[in-house]
């Protein structure tokens, strides 16, 4: 049957609207682009910093011992408290002393160092290069053991 040009087309009713297929859903990335951007801007650097710090603290660059007198030893830090100290190493009496800065993260080792203040001590340390955050200590040398030497 031919359509009469004088009669206008009818409008859509409820059945017609229900029969029309809905538009395809947009992807999750398009709907949540703001959240994904924030996750990438803050999450990725945080994850990279965490992995780097873990790797730097897990692998020791060098291990060794130093003998001398502890000249300064104090607990430092605004948020992350670590024990920081200086060992005076002098190989020849009367020569200028060499200062060896070190960090202690273990409280039992720090207590042993405090008990040996004023005497000559042997510090066992691990050197960790590449530690980014000062929250883990201000130096690269982390003392893991102490031994007070006889006078």
Image (tube, grey):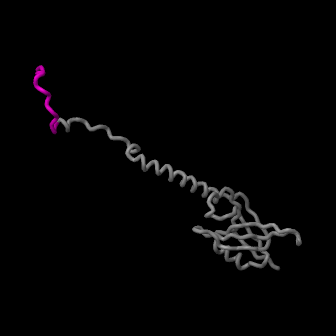
Residue 28 picture quarter: top left
Q: Locate residue 35 relative to residue 72 in the image: left or right.
A: left
Which residue does the image show at 10% across and 23% down from the upper left? 6
Q: Nearer the viewer, residue 109 or 97?
A: 97
Residue at 81 percent of width and 69 percent of height: 89
113, 34: nearer the viewer: 34
The image position of residue 79, as x and y in percent, is 57, 68
- Outermost residue on the top side: it is 2
Q: Foreground residue, 3 or 20?
A: 3
Residue 71 figure quarter: bottom right
Residue 26 lies in the magenta stretch: no
Residue 5 belongs to the span the image colors magenta: yes
Up the image or down, 132 lies above or below 22; here it is below
Q: Is residue 75 above or below residue 138?
A: below
Considering the whole magenta stretch, tell me its main secondary structure.
loop
Which quarter shows the C terminus?
Answer: bottom right
Which residue is situated farthest in the front direction here?
6
Quarter occupied by residue 125:
bottom right
Q: Which residues are magenta?
A: 1-15
Coordinates of residue 86 in the picture (x, y in percent): 74, 70
Query: Of 89 and 4, which appears nearest the observer?
Result: 4
Residue 29, horizontal then vertical, whole percent? 41, 44
Q: Residue at x 61, y 64 (%)?
A: 135
Judge left or right: residue 83 versus residue 14: right
Q: Quadrant of the N terminus?
A: top left
- Residue 98 point in image, percent of width and height: 81, 66
């Amino acid at each position: 049957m031919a359509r009469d040009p004088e009669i206008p087309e009818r409008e859509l009713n409820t059945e017609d609207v229900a029969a029309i297929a809905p538009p395809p859903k947009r992807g999750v990335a398009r709907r949540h682009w703001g959240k994904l951007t924030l996750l990438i801007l803050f999450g990725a650097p945080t994850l990279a910093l965490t992995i780097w710090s873990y790797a730097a603290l897990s692998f020791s660059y060098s291990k060794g011992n130093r003998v001398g007198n502890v000249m300064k030893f104090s607990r430092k830090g605004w948020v992350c408290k670590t024990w920081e100290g200086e060992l005076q190493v002098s190989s020849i009496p009367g020569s200028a002393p060499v200062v060896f800065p070190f960090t202690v993260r273990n409280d039992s080792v720090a207590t042993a160092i405090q008990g040996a203040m004023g005497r000559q001590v042997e510090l066992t340390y691990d050197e960790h290069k590449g530690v980014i955050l000062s929250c883990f200590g201000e130096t690269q040398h982390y003392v893991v053991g102490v031994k007070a030497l006889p006078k």
